[in-house]
Image (tube, coloured by chain):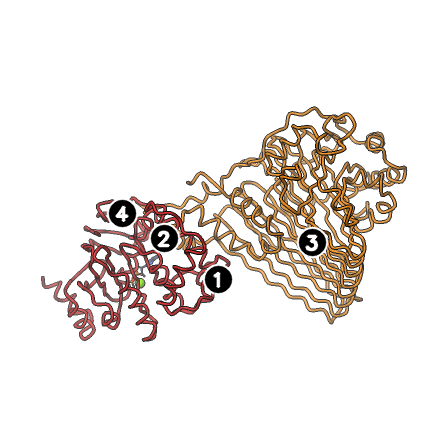
């Protein structure tokens, strides 16, 4: 008889808590993709001509591209003609205020822990909620407007601020950038738009909450954040989806532009439905996120906590164009059950004395496969560039995997690039140590995992650090206790 | 309080404990001495519930309960504490956080209200003074980058805060200088009370100069070969262990 057997399998067998479906009438375009569908989307959104032309150009380019196959993931073939490219909750005219939002939608967000009623909302966080393809509510619009900050659904921005959209859209992620970016450029439906004017410090955290509800739809949102000279903004993105047996595609594009002395902090807590423990269903999360530090001394910081999705393929990146600009990437990625995460970052050093920091924490459990893929590229112009990369992997059990692919292209001899990598198992003796002090096995696992992720969590805004910790513990929670 | 009868345990195919008997009553301090590899840490691990040890025969009763049937955390909550010979490092997990979680888990079990951060700090500060530990240790990772001596002190700090009913100390005195040894001894002595018991695993008589044992045992090749009062420890120090074995073979 063995004294006890800590059952990690049981511990990592968790339940997805956001898997309910909202029963709401939707206006959904039949599956399939051609130029007519794109014209239809553009018409439904009342877009100006430049937008339609831009979409069609992207679509024509997409037709010439092939789905990439180099990421370290196993993937079922995706039939792009079987996906519906537009789904919106049915409504008369579009809500003018929260009072007009369908109560069922408000209840959905309530259930997800994102109450949209401003008085109930955490003080100081403005929320834009995107349900399937459209934005359903944006809170605190007025308070932000007083500061001159524009924070609105992307569709509104196309109509109300076309000059800003036209000036910045696609300047960081060109439509032809990659297969999914091209697809997104052709069919994107909504997302958030942020513009912070010169010298303004955005008075509150901005947050967008994405929810995929309808079946057989893809979500293709587009986010554009522009921080003009000397401005500051902190933005958080959260996401969930119902449990469905089929895979759903999520191919977003996020573009950030930081002008001279501007700072953007972009945090993601991603909790798309990961599929069940046998790998059935779940979201395919293929996202292009890139920021450009366009002006001198600007700074872009990505922080991500990735716990969901069946397959994650995402590399938030920084193009450090301005001299003395700074790019940062802090990431926690969890791959549990049959999840596959292929994530990392690219730091492209162009300006002089540009600096970048990469801290990646990968946790693999169950049969999860976690891959870090990172590129540090220093161009000849980037005199004095510096990069520090740290990649740590934590394995729970012996059926999961961790893989690290750091790529470096250094074309300036003055560059200093450091890389550190570790792989550790959640050690039985660490677990035993905590348990021998009276702490339950489940709490012990959480403690050790949180300890491992601490340096990343401390980069998150306060409220979200707590949310991220909870999310991680829910994602690892099991039958024990 | 602790009653071990004919305990046999092995790791894989290797038999390590071979019929061990030990009786510890409340209020007593027992010292277990014995050569390297005789099974002292194995005994401590089996009592604390570490995985990987197979108990093939025998019983362990603690307070009338079958100790071996309990999970490690249940044993801890029931008042069993093991100060490890080699405390493990847990990077990023705050030392104070683990200790507070442990204290509250144990208090819940005892039907006591949980302590909040302020109460905890007040309590732990007092104990740290006793252990002559700097408060900065609270905010470091559990044993992360601690020296050998600091790890041992941290074990005793945890013991002092958790106030176990049965404390097992596995070579806590090894590698300590004389000042640290006194500090550890103080920690043990301040825990002594009529309803608590302490089992000290040690190689050296010198700890016993500060913590006076009621009974001294010799553990040899997986069994208790001889027990006596504190004078046995002095004799072992002088004569080594061989004579005990010879005496046992004759008997
Ligand atoms: N994990 C293990 N696998 C195999 N043998 C072990 C293991 N741990 C300890 N042993 C062996 O068991 C015996 C008893 O070890 P231990 O209880 O640590 O002795 P002590 O603490 O008295 O020095 C030793 O011979 C040791 O080599
Ligand atoms: Mg030992």
Whole-percent x, y for residue B138 in the image: 45, 62
Q: Residue at x 72, y 36 (%)?
A: A137
Q: Are marks 1 and 2 on the same chain?
A: no
Q: Chain of mark 4?
A: B
Whole-percent x, y for residue A304 in the image: 64, 50
Instruction: Judge whether A95 appears above or below B244 on screen.
Output: above
* Residue highlighted by disc 4: B67
Q: Are marks 3 and 1 on the same chain?
A: no
Task: Please give the letter of the chain rendered in orange.
Answer: A
Mark nearer the N terminus (1 vs 4): 4
Which of the 4 image quarters holds residue B221?
A: bottom left
Q: CA distance from mark 4 to mark 2?
A: 13 Å
* Mark 1 close to ligand 2, CB under 8 Å: no
Q: Residues within 10 Å of mark 1 (few under 14, many from 20)?
A: few
Q: Chain of mark 3?
A: A
Q: Residue furthest left?
A: B251
Residues at badges 1 and 2 in contact (C-beta under 8 Å)? no
Q: Residues within 10 Å of mark 3 (few under 14, many from 20)?
A: many
Q: CA distance from mark 1 to mark 4?
A: 34 Å
Specify the colour of chain B.
red
* Residue highlighted by disc 1: B139
Instruction: Judge whether A36 appears above or below A122 on screen.
Output: above
On residue A265, the disc is: 3
């Amino acid at each position: 008889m063995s004294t006890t057997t800590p059952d990690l399998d049981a511990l990592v067998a968790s339940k997805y808590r956001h898997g309910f479906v909202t029963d709401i009438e939707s206006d959904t375009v039949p599956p399939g993709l051609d130029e007519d569908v794109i014209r239809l989307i553009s018409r439904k959104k009342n877009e100006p001509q430049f937008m339609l032309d831009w979409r069609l150009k992207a679509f024509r380019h997409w037709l010439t591209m092939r789905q990439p196959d180099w990421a370290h993931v196993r993937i079922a073939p995706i039939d792009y003609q079987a996906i519906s490219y537009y789904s919106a909750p049915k409504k008369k005219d579009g809500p003018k205020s929260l009072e007009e939002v369908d109560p069922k939608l408000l209840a959905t967000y309530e259930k997800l822990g994102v109450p949209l009623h401003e008085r109930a909302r955490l003080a100081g966080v403005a929320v834009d909620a995107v349900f399937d393809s459209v934005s359903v509510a944006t809170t605190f619009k007025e308070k932000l407007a007083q500061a001159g900050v524009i924070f609105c659904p992307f569709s509104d921005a196309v109509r109300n601020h076309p000059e800003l959209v036209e000036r910045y859209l696609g300047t960081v992620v060109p439509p032809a950038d990659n297969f999914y970016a091209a697809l997104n450029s052709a069919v994107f439906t909504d997302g958030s738009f942020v513009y912070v004017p010169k010298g303004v410090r955005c008075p509150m955290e901005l947050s967008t909450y994405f929810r995929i509800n309808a079946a057989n739809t893809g979500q293709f949102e587009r986010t554009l954040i522009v921080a003009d000279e000397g401005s500051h903004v902190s933005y958080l993105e959260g996401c969930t989806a119902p449990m469905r047996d089929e895979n759903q595609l999520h191919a977003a594009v996020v573009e950030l532009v930081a002008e001279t002395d501007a700072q953007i902090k972009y945090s993601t807590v991603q909790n798309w439905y990961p599929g069940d423990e046998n790998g059935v269903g779940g979201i395919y999360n293929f996202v292009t996120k890139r920021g450009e530090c366009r002006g001198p001394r600007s700074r872009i910081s990505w922080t991500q906590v990735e716990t969901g999705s069946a397959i994650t393929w995402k590399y938030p990146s920084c193009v450090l164009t301005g001299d003395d600009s700074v790019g940062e990437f802090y990431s926690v990625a969890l791959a549990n059950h049959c999840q596959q995460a292929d994530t990392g970052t690219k730091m492209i050093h162009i300006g002089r004395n540009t600096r970048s920091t990469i801290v990646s924490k990968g946790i693999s459990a169950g049969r999860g496969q976690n891959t870090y893929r990172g590129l540090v590229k220093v161009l000849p112009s980037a005199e004095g560039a510096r990069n520090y990369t740290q990649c740590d992997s934590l394995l729970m059990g012996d059926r999961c995997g961790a893989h690290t692919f750091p790529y470096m292209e250094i074309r300036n001899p003055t560059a200093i690039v450091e890389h550190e990598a570790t792989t550790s198992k959640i050690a039985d003796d660490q677990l035993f140590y905590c348990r021998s002090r009276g702490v339950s096995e489940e709490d012990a696992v959480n403690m050790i995992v949180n300890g491992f992720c601490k340096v990343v969590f401390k980069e998150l805004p306060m409220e979200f650090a707590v949310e991220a910790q909870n999310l991680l513990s829910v994602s690892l929670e099991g039958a024990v206790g | 309080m602790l009653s071990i009868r004919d305990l046999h345990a092995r790791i894989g195919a290797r038999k390590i404990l071979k019929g061990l008997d030990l009786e510890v009553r409340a209020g007593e301090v027992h010292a277990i001495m014995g050569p390297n590899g005789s099974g002292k840490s194995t005994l401590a691990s089996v009592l604390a519930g570490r995985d990987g040890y197979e108990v093939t025969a025998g019983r362990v009763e603690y307070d009338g309960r079958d100790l071996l049937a309990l999970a490690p955390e249940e044993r801890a909550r029931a008042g069993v504490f093991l100060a490890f010979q080699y405390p493990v490092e847990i990077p990023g997990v705050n030392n104070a956080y683990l200790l507070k979680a442990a204290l509250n888990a144990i208090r819940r079990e005892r039907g006591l209200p949980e302590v909040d951060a302020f109460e905890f700090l007040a309590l732990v500060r007092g104990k740290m003074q006793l252990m002559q530990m700097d408060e900065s240790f609270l905010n470091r990772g559990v044993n992360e980058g601690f020296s050998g001596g600091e790890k041992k002190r941290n074990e005793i700090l945890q013991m002092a805060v958790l106030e176990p009913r049965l404390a097992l100390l596995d070579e806590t005195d090894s590698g300590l200088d004389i000042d640290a040894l006194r500090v550890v001894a103080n920690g043990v002595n301040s825990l002594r009370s009529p309803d608590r018991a302490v089992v000290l695993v040690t190689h050296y008589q010198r700890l016993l100069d500060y913590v006076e044992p009621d009974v001294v045992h010799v553990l040899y090749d997986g069994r208790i070969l001889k027990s006596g009062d504190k004078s046995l420890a002095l004799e072992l120090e002088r004569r080594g262990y061989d004579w005990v074995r010879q005496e046992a073979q004759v008997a």
